[in-house]
Image (cartoon, rainbow, N blue to C red):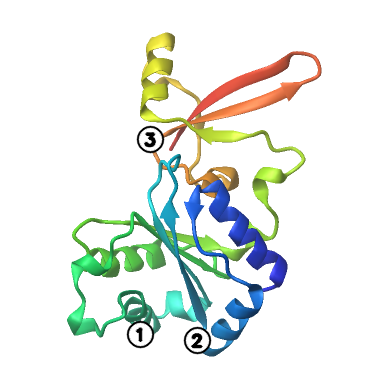
Amino acid sequence: MEKDIFNNIQEFYKYRKLLTDPVEYKTYKEYYDKQTYFMQKTEKDKDNLCGNSLVILTNNNNVSVTSNFDNLLQIISGKKKKDYQTSDFNYDSIIFIADIEPSKNILKSCESKIWNLCDRKPIIELLHLGLFYNIIPKGIYCSPHYIINKEEEENLLTFLKCDKSCLPVILSSDPYCIWIGGRKGQIIKIERNSENTGENIYYRTVV
């Protein structure tokens, strides 16, 4: 992984409103070259609506090959497979970042293995490295996107006299949606500026 991509992933945490200890690229590179993975534990900040995450930067084989993935599970918990405890997985989501196209089969395999070890079922995300070639929200044609909280949702839907299903939609696979951590069922607020009409606000339901 190039330094620019690694730095963009550190920016990704800020857009997800995740707090993590700063890591130098050199530290990451030395560890990754030996172990073929690198983990960063994060905590949610006060405005985070998606929970805390464990982020694993890894290679293709660690995610797609069962034996290697079992090794990753051992790494996550710090214990041998027979000693796993459900309390070892206290994350709202586990994010794998690898140079591999997301596959439903691989994702389901990841989910089944991790969910069997958890009291709760964390959201499993398999993100392609290409999402971090650029900082998506800083794109010249990108308008600011925000996840609104439950109170804002209720006020909006009361004002519009409708439910979420009446709003236009945005896919959970949309790159901007991924960068801010939009989950299915949440409402995204989009602010667009136009020379002709000024500031306009749009709302989308994540599907």
Between 88 and 129, the one nearer to me in the picture: 88
What residue is at 60 percent from the left and 60 percent from the top? 10
Q: Which residue is mark 2?
A: 35
Q: Is residue 89 left or right of residue 68?
A: left
Pinpoint residue 79: horizontal percent, then vertical percent: 27, 82
Q: Is residue 136 left or right of residue 74?
A: right
Q: Secondary structure at mark 2?
A: helix
**Crowd rating for badge 2 (residues with CA inside 10 Å; few <14, some 14–19, many 20+):** few
Q: Position of residue 51 (x, y in %)?
A: 38, 49
Question: What amino acid does circle 1 point to?
Answer: Ser
Name the residue located 40 percent from the left edge and 67 percent from the top edge: 106
Instruction: For mark 3, give the secondary structure.
Output: loop
In which quarter of the view is residue 52 placed?
bottom left
Q: Which mark is residue 67?
A: 1
Name which residue type carries label 2: Gln
**Sequence-first tag of 3 and 1:** 1
Mark 2 to mark 3 CA distance (whole Å)? 37 Å
| Front label number (2 vs 3) | 2
Q: Residue at x 73, y 44 (%)?
A: 139
In the image, what residue occupies the spot 33% across and 76% down?
73
Placement of 81 over or under 204, stated as above or below: below
